[in-house]
Image (cartoon, rainbow, N blue to C red):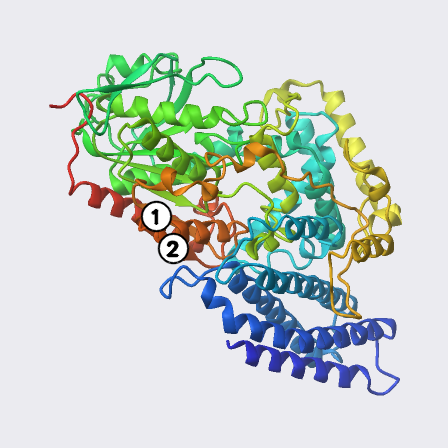
Amino acid sequence: MDYKDVFASLETVCEDNISILCGPSELPYGAVAKRLLVCMREIREHGRVLLPVVAGFTAVFHHYDLDEQTPGNGYRTLAKVLLSCLLHIIHKGRYIASNYNSAFFRADHNASEMEAYCSALCQLRALLHLAQQLIHDNGFGQLYSLEGADLSRRFVREYSSMHKACFYGRCLGFQFSPTLRPFLQTIVISMVTYGETYSKQQSGLGLAALSLLTSGKYVIDPELRGAEFERITQNLDMQFWKSFWNLTESGLIGGFSRIASYPVQVNFTLTVPPVTLHLPLASDPSLTAAVSPPVAHSGPGPVHMRLISHELREGQDSEELLAYSRIDPPPITASHLPWVQKQPRSPWLLIHFHGGGFVAQTSRSHENYLRSWSKELRVPILSVDYSLSPEAPFPRALEECYYAYCWALNNCHLLGSTAECVCLAGDSAGGNLCITVSMKAICSGVRVPDGMMVAYPATLLTTDASPSRLLTLFDPLLPLGVLTKCINAYAGADSPTVQTALASGSLSALGRDTAALLSDLTQSASNWIQSYLDPARTSGGTRSLSASPPTGSPSAAARRTPAEATDAANSDGRTGYPEGFEPLRSECLAYVRPTSCPVIRNPFVSPLLAPASLLRGLPPVHIVASALDGLLDDSVMFAKKLRAMQQPVQLTVVEDLPHGFLSLYQLAKETDVAADICMEQIRIIFQGGSQRRRPTPGET
């Protein structure tokens, strides 16, 4: 629908509701009617102000696309998200106008729904104002101002004080595909429940019982859920995020994932010892380059990998390969299953680096779509389990991934491949590692991969402001506070102190004493009931649960009221909002540690900042980004940079999906389609690489 039609419909809906609510005094619902009237007037005012703003964006946002065939950038997304919010308001407003006098009309519920969207609209208006500043301050066609330190600081300060809970309650996921919204609600409820029980240091069945009993209140009270999610995403430590994201590694969840995924004949882990490798130089195969094992931070150590293959191929059951296996006894091979027909080595090899913000997950978390790719592409896949931050910050992960790549080239015959064509694939942090491993191969003079498929890659690990970065203010899967924690952890800016992770996926608690378990259940029930007796924990609006400021945060700032936060914002000269308008402020201020560590601007950390000399010679880069991802502009600007250098690059932008959509494979039709798009880009790389046959190491 054209934006003008949307705004016209909004104006009509507001006028219809206002005329009904300003009718005879004997109208039902009294105070609720007044709430609705105030709300509809505010929405009408926001709509009238935003119409020319959206018109301004629509007139120019095509200048920020990669090309005419690839529409996609943060300005387009912000306008689309706003229109999505308005369409929800129009739908709800029409329902209210048609059913207000019905005997079954749920007045309080509908008023709360409209108030939530009104709050969201207010915050989106603020984000669009910030986006206008970006257009004004950035160069023509530029989505980032890499020198705009002041602008980036203003963006971080606004994020720290702006109210966000409205996006995580009744409005949760309004911008995403409708089929994903129930799943996103499940994630958010799981996260806030896990956050509440996180500090109790329980495990197994006790933690599961506690979480089950506390989750109910977040299902029936969206305002409480939003406030708690805002608190968690802003101020809980990195160890919480590591432990929560690693729940996908648990036996129960992982088991369900494997049941739903395609069966494969080869799936086992390898441990490669730290020995120096020797690879032929790409320019002169008669000469070799030495590749040292990973040494950063902890000294030489092994590299862990997972081999996945839909079909058993030559070499995959060899004694030489099985010697690297961490499984005892070794995996079942063709000698144990004589009816399995062994296939010849594939000319293709896919090397995969998983996502997880450099801090969480392993190849096991990504098995679901990797199994599908192995079947559909008929290719063996080697997925690298690199060391994670903050315990192993940069450059350890890069060293391990590069070493794994070189080892795979030397030992492709063991992996069921002749490596005639080698493709790298990765998502998010893994996409970053695909690019930087290729850069390292260029610098070392060894064979570069024949291409790479990178999904929503992180190419700029800073908080530099961009229009898509503004989406992190309300993204349930990648809030700015969490993003900066991951960035600082990878850069080594966070303390590497290791806390004991919660073994929440373990079933060891089944043997716990029954009395102890009953105690957990009793305490959980008591906490749940008490939460309803305490009015401070059920307030909506801009209120949130109190939380102590994190270690190192300015305590005075953490104690500011919303009014004080607004005054401080204006005194810093960072808002410049139109007279009479101010976004809602949060009582739970975020402490966002600046991404100012010099390591972050290392080109092997942020490849968008790499000079042309490091990027020239990259193989074809196929980027699959999401329009609703806070890292969208990273992909667009990186593609623009490569195209300006006449490097082969292709950008595909999928709609209505969040960051990390590959991890949501098989949960919705849209995520399956997006995963298939990624797979087809890999197929293109393989088919193109097969046309230019390269000798593999050891060939003459």
Q: Secondary structure at mark 1?
A: strand
In the image: residue 76, left or right of residue 221: left
The amino acid pointed to by label 2 is Thr
In the rendered image, which residue does mark 1 sit on? 622
In the rendered image, which residue does mark 2 sit on? 652
Q: Secondary structure at mark 2?
A: strand
Give percent across and percent down for residue 184: 58, 50
Out of 617 and 429, give the one closest to the viewer. Answer: 617
Q: Quadrant of residue 102?
A: bottom right
Q: Residues within 10 Å of mark 1 (few under 14, many from 20)?
A: many
Give percent across and percent down for residue 539: 83, 53
User: Which residue shows up at 24% across the image and 38% down it?
Assistant: 378
Q: Is residue 261 visible?
A: no
Give percent across and percent down for residue 224: 76, 50
Up-down relation of residue 671 to residue 436 (above or below): below
Q: Residues within 10 Å of mark 2 (few under 14, many from 20)?
A: many
In the image: residue 526, left or right of residue 630: right
Q: Quadrant of residue 294?
A: top left
In the image: residue 62, left or right of residue 265: right
Tally the numbered discs: 2
Out of 509 and 434, give the one closest to the viewer. Answer: 434
The amino acid pointed to by label 1 is His
User: Which residue shows up at 80% across the image and 49% down it?
Assistant: 544
Q: Is residue 153 visible?
A: yes
Give percent across and percent down for residue 317: 25, 19
Q: Quadrant of residue 689?
A: top left
Q: Where's the C terminus, which quadrant?
A: top left
Q: Are marks 1 and 2 in contact (CB under 8 Å)?
A: yes
